[in-house]
Amino acid sequence: MPSLRELQVAFFSALESGVAGGTRVGPDLGAAVESRGTLDAAARIDVYAQMYWMRIADALREDFPRIATLVGDDAFQRLAREYLGATPSRHPSLRHVGGGFADFLATRPPAGLPPFVADLARLEWARLDVFDAPDADVLRIADLRRVPAEDWGDLRLRAIPALRVLDVAWPVHVVWPDDATTTALQPKATTLRVWRDEYRVFQSPMDAAESAALALVVGDATGDGAVPSGLSSDDAGPAGATFADVCAALAAATPPEEAAAHAAALLLRWVDDRLLAALAS
């Protein structure tokens, strides 16, 4: 008889083969499972294999509800099966099963799928990320009022953990509330900020000036003001950026005499949206 470990490996291998559409049961595993009623060993194991992949498909549908609605149940089931066959789950938690879904969609032929579906998946995954991100105290207007005017240049701004900056080729944020927009959607390079305030998740497009400024706050590894796709405040560490840094970034994109006022307006917008962390004590 094979060992318990060998049976476990064989059983999981059978489950994974079922995802691809045909459950393959090795001879040792088949000999270890009894036939019951009208079901032989292979048929009984196939029941578990189908339950296995369908449960993961259900988790994917929960993580990507807009894509599931957009393509329809049957097409999403096919997508889920193909994705799981190409990218088997390797994490104990279903929370991580969709981590490669956007990249998988980006490599698929466009036939039968909207061309922006991969970017929509990136947005849905970013929303899930910020929903699960740690809580943090936020910066408030009252906190800013206590900062002397002469100290504003050194005011250090940090993003909350529940913030992501996302570069996409399609303005998929407009698809989110209204499926009717999908027929008229045109490609347009777009930078989105996605964040959570308490239990609600928000998203908003940014222009080049705001993107460059926020890149400094959340952490810009490139140093050129560009926002790396998928950038999160977790990448920045505790340093953030000073208000003077933000003004300098905006001076490159706006008339220098307007940079400070523009930076102040951006700061108030970010505070109002509750995406900056409270000042360090």
Image (cartoon, rainbow, N blue to C red):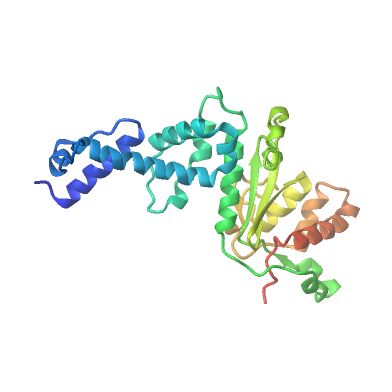
State the count of labels.
0
- Identify the residue at the far front of this view: 37
Give the image location of residue 263, x and y in percent: 82, 57
Give the camera-side residue of 187 and 229: 187
Give the camera-side residue of 77 and 257: 77
- Identify the residue at the far top of this view: 111
Q: Is residue 247 visible?
A: yes
Q: From the viewer's perspective, is residue 94 above or below residue 70? A: below
Q: Residue at x 55, y 38 (%)?
A: 68
**Residue 241, picture quadrant:** bottom right
Give the image location of residue 226, x and y in percent: 68, 45
Q: Residue at x 22, y 48 (%)?
A: 8
Give the camera-side residue of 71 and 185: 71
Give the camera-side residue of 178 and 224: 178
Give the image location of residue 134, x and y in percent: 57, 64
Task: Tell whether 146 sits left or right of 94.
Answer: right
Q: From the viewer's perspective, is residue 199 above or below residue 202? A: below
Q: Residue at x 59, y 55 (%)?
A: 130
* Quadrant location of the C terminus in the rendered image: bottom right
Q: From the viewer's perspective, is residue 146 above or below residue 187? A: below
Give the image location of residue 65, x and y in percent: 57, 43
Q: Is residue 98 visible?
A: no
- Identify the residue at the far left of this view: 1
